[in-house]
Image (cartoon, grey):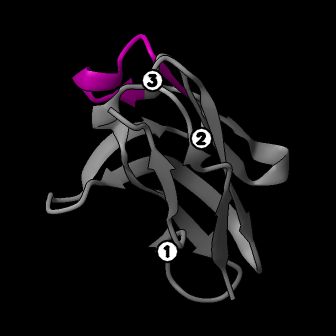
Amino acid sequence: QVQLVESGGGLVQAGGSLRLSCAASGSILSINAMGWYRQARGKQRELVATITSGGTTDYVDSVKGRFTISRDNAKNTVYLEMNSLKAEDTAVYYCNALITPVSGRSGHYWGQGTQVTVPS
């Protein structure tokens, strides 16, 4: 059974920094792309950043230059370093990964979500 477990959310003042982590565990054969999404209250979930297995990254325009996604393939972990945080970054952040399990078909797996709050 595959699962993603996130950590690192919290409350931070505007201009501050947080680092989110998401570790995949279970019977994993391989992990392809990994990414972070966020959902603010009353809004749709949006893609924040992605990283391929080879390390190619992409970001939504609103976080470019402030957020950095990275991964440690040996640890099956993806990170999101968030700097210069703004009130509009407040949301529940979810990690997502395209995983091929040891048995079964590839699929997208989600973490449970971690709250990031930046007071205005």
The tag earlier along the polypeptide, 1 or 2, is: 2
Disc 3 secondary structure class: loop
Residue that numbered label 3 is attached to: 14
* Part of the protein shown in magenta: 58-68
On the image, numbered disc 2 is attached to which residue? Answer: 53
Residue 1 in view of the camera:
yes
Along the viewing direction, whichever of 12 and 108 lies nearer the viewer: 12
Quadrant of the image containing the N terminus = bottom right
Give residue 107's position: percent from left, percent from top. Answer: 45, 74
Q: Viewer-nearest of labels 3 and 1?
A: 3
Q: Secondary structure at mark 1?
A: loop
Q: Nearer the viewer, residue 56 or 78?
A: 78
Seen in the image, is 104 located left or right of residue 39? right
In this rendering, is residue 92 above or below 67?
Answer: below
Amino acid type indicated by mark 1: Ser
- As helix, strand or loop, the secondary structure at mark 2 comes to loop
Local crowd at mark 1 within 10 Å, few (<14), some, or many (≥20)? some
Q: Marks 2 and 3: in contact by CB < 8 Å?
A: no
Q: x and y percent of residue 4 in the render?
A: 63, 69
Please state which amino acid type lies under the numbered disc 2.
Ser
